[in-house]
Image: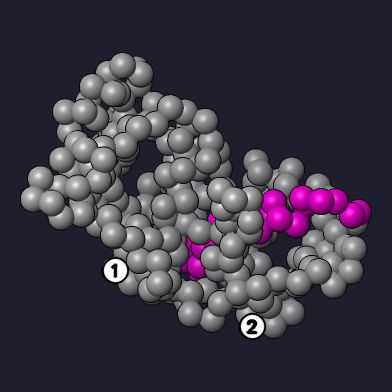
Amino acid sequence: GCGGETGTSGSSGDSGSASNGEARTDINIAIAADPGTFNPYQFGGPDYSKICKSIYQTLAFLTLEKEFEPIIAESWEQIDNLTYTVKLKENVYDSENNHIDANDVYYSCQQHMNSAQASAWKYSDDENPVEVTGNYELTFHFKQETCTAFTSLLTGVMIVDSEAHAADSEGYTNNPIGTGPYIFKEWVLGDSLTFVKNENYFDKDHMPTITDMTWRVIPEGSSRTIALETG
C-alpha cells in the first residue's frame, strides 16, 4: 500500500473478538485523509491504494513472504527473456456479476498504460506491449530484460469490466465496481468510507469474515488512537 498512518479497531475496540466472545464481523480503520477518488487509474490520497484494493484486484499480489500469489491470474510463464504469458481464472466476476476475461484485462492494461501510472510500462515493447492470445490468456512483450517489469504489472494493474468502465469511466470516481471482496456503500466526505462484504465474491476459498468495514478519516495521530480505542 501507500504511505499514511493507519490503525484498526474491532467491533468492541479490542484485538479481534466481540464482547460475547464471537469473532468480530466489523472493523474500523483510521486513515489520515480522504482517498480523493476510487478511479483505479488515478492517484488519490496517501491511503488510496489500500482502500482501492478492497474493491479492485490485480492479476497477482506480493505476500509478506515476498512471494507472488495469483488472484485473477491462474498462472504465468516466462517464454523467453522478453515474453511472458498469463492464464486467467475462468470464474472471475465483479460485484455487478460482469464476467472477466482476457479482453477485460487487456482493456484494463490499456487504461493503466494511458494513466499517470504509465511509468510501469516503460520497459514494455513499444509496438505490442500486451496482446490477447486466448479467451483467458494474454501475452506480455518487453523491449529489454528486467527483474521487475513483468511482476510490477502483475501486481499493479487493477482489473475492471471493459464494457461497464467504458460506459461510465467517470462514474468509477465515486461508485467503483470491482472484483474484490468488498463493495462500496457510502462515502461521507472528510469523515468516513463504508464498505460491505461482497456476498458474490468469486474466490469462495478466501471469503472475508469481516462483513462491514469502515475507513474513518482522522487526520491527527493522537486523535486517531483515542478514536479507535473508544470504538
Which percent across, then down, holds residue 181?
Answer: 38, 61
Is 188 on the left or on the right of 66, as rendered? left
Answer yes or no: is residue 95 visible: no
Q: Which residue in the protein does label 1 denote? A: 199
Within the magenta stretch, is there residue 148?
yes
Tell me which residue sits at (60%, 74%) in the image: 74
Secondary structure under tag 2 reads loop
- Give the answer, above or below, for where 7 lies relative to 38: above
Tell me which residue sits at (69%, 51%) in the image: 152
Tell me which residue sits at (70%, 71%) in the image: 76
Which percent across, then down, holds residue 34?
Answer: 38, 32
Among the 4 quarters of the image, the one containing residue 206:
bottom left
- Say whether disc 1 or disc 2 marks the residue closer to the N-terminus: 2
Q: Which residue in the protein does label 2 denote? A: 135
Is 153 on the left or on the right of 99, as rendered? right
Q: Quick one: label 1, few (<14), some, or many (20+) residues within 10 Å?
A: some
Tell me which residue sits at (51%, 67%) in the image: 161
Residue interval drawn in magenta:
144-168
Secondary structure under tag 1 reads loop
Answer yes or no: is residue 220 visible: yes
- Give the answer, above or below, for where 156 lies relative to 227: below
